[in-house]
Amino acid sequence: MRIGEILDRKGGDVATIRPDASLHDVLAQLEQRGIGALVVSTDGSDVEGIVTERDLVRVLARQGAAALDGEVRSIMTATVVTCARDATVDEVMSMMTDSRFRHVPVVEDGRLAGIISIGDVVKSTIDELEVKARSLESYVTGTY
Ligand code: AMP
């Protein structure tokens, strides 16, 4: 399955945050939206970085709550691995497992077009396996 098919179903909206926003803002957005990552972007389209709950946990453990006054750019990952809509789910799953992160922004023509989380990858893999299992069952029972 292609990443574009997942985006067609779940939509291409991506929660973004400016690099000069505070870590208090990151915390609030992650909590309000019930998500684990924000793409860092000044204009909401150009990917400048990514900040996730992991980055917040790291800075809080090392520096304590005072670190929340700092800017997003101080803890974001600036070299972001992205994919295109025509990447396959298997390719994105390999990116996630090889590099040990759970979010991959989707970029088309240099602009942010969506984001895929490990939850999306797992859901699509389970859906595909269910379809295969059903068709095998129909084949075996002769009901196809
Ligand atoms: P995650 O597992 O997605 O919470 O991220 C774990 C770490 O990898 C954090 O330091 C993130 O900033 C970083 N990270 C997450 N997604 C990406 C990505 N697509 N490209 C590069 N780094 C990432």
Image (cartoon, rainbow, N blue to C red):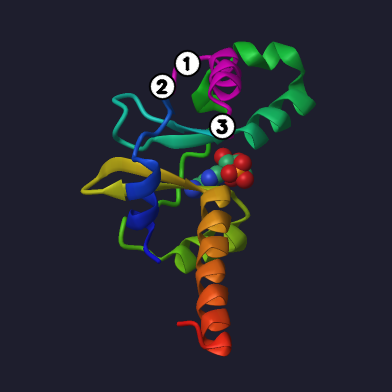
Viewer-side label of 3, 2: 3
Q: In the picture provided, is 69 more to the left or to the right than 132?
A: right
Label 3 SS: loop
* Residue bounds of the magenta highlight: 19-36
- What is the distance, in whole Å, between disc 3 and disc 2 at their CAs? 17 Å
Label 1 SS: loop
Q: In the picture provided, is 79 more to the left or to the right than 136?
A: left
Give the label on residue 21, or none.
1
- The mark that comes first in sequence, 1 or 3, is 1
- Which residue is at a point 24% across and 45% down the rendered structure image? 110
Rendered location of residue 106, percent (x, y): 36, 48
Q: Are marks 1 and 2 in contact (CB under 8 Å)?
A: yes
Rendered location of residue 62, percent (x, y): 77, 27
Say which amino acid is labelled 1: Ala
Say which amino acid is labelled 2: Arg
How packed mark 2 is, by other alpha carbons closer than 10 Å (few <14, some 14-19, many 20 or more), is: many
Give the label on residue 35, or none.
3
Where is ligand 1, by quadrant?
Answer: top right
- Which residue is at a point 33% across and 24% down the rendered structure image? 42
Label 2 SS: loop
